[in-house]
Image: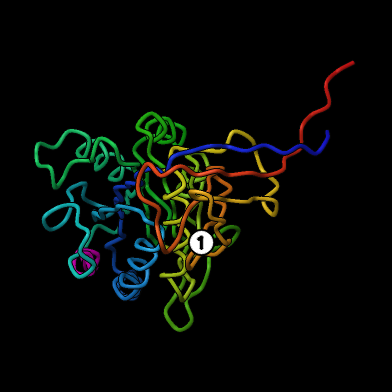
Amino acid sequence: SILARTCDEQEFPTLKSDFIFVVDNSGSMSEEQAGLANAADQFYAALVASGLDARLGVVTTDSQVLRGDGFTNDPSVFQDDVQVGIGGNGVEMGLEFAAQAVSLADTNADDARRFRDDAAKVVIVISAEDATNLRSVPDYVDFFNQEGVILYAIVGPRPVGCVFVGLGAARVGESYIDVAQATGGASASICNPNLAETIAEILVGAAGAASKSPLTRTPISSSLHVDVQGASIVRSRSDGFDYEASSNTVLFFGTQPDRGTPIDISYQFFKPLEAG
């Protein structure tokens, strides 16, 4: 291969995502629910910084019905919704109820409980156990892929799960990790004491998926140069741009260009040598 350079001309898109959080409501989850609620302000700040027009909804591992009034963009409402309690079924069926919640959000007559037509669909599962499944893992993968859903899993990591300091243990979330990887998402450890940091990284990935404006080539990341209306933009996640590899997308943070603003993205890439 040889080193080449190109320039992509794009328009700044409208970034929309609707999130369904699937929160384990079994007896071992009170500390994690509190941590998720406490993280709300920090990852809402990450949402604002990424320019993502997001709504958040919450279901549990034993119910497909969105809690409260449905999707919300109010952090205080979300903080209440995610504290789902610990009186749920000890047989956690997070993948099944995630799939059922997606189906409901596709068809619900209530705008507050229905996916927006132009929004990326994201499911985030938070559980200290693996799922008990009514279908095979490949069946869930097929369902979520057909629905255009990206699933992220905040669960016990491979190979042996993890231990919360002074709080107990989380088993490996095998099914969740498999589905996350197969739908273009990712997994993270539920034992991370900073859930806000974990979710903020997920939000960046979701913003990339929502942009629907991938680069035409896979860039050498360090070579990226971005101009907005002739002005060079610095690389920064506080006020500038950055590259999101999983979606091959340039994202803006902090000051956002107006929707439809022309953007020039130049970069180097490796070009295969032609045969002969």
Around disc 1, counting alpha carbons within 10 Å, would you say few (fewer than 14), some (14 to 19), or many (20 or more)? some
Residue segment shown in magenta: 78-87
Q: From what the image shows, is residue 7 above or below residue 55? A: above
What's the residue at 57%, 56% (across, down)? 232
**Residue 56, position as x, y percentages in the image:** 26, 55
Is residue 85 part of the magenta span, yes or no?
Answer: yes
Residue under label 1, please give it.
Answer: 240
What's the residue at 35%, 68% (across, down)? 45
**Residue 164, position as x, y percentages in the image:** 47, 76
The foreground one among 188 and 49 is: 49
Is residue 185 part of the magenta span, yes or no?
Answer: no
**Residue 8, position as x, y percentages in the image:** 58, 37
Q: From what the image shows, is residue 237 above or below residue 65? A: below
Residue 74 as seen in the image, left or right of residue 269: left
Residue 98 as seen in the image, left or right of residue 85: right
Hey, which residue is sitting farthest right in the picture?
276
The foreground one among 136 and 52 is: 52
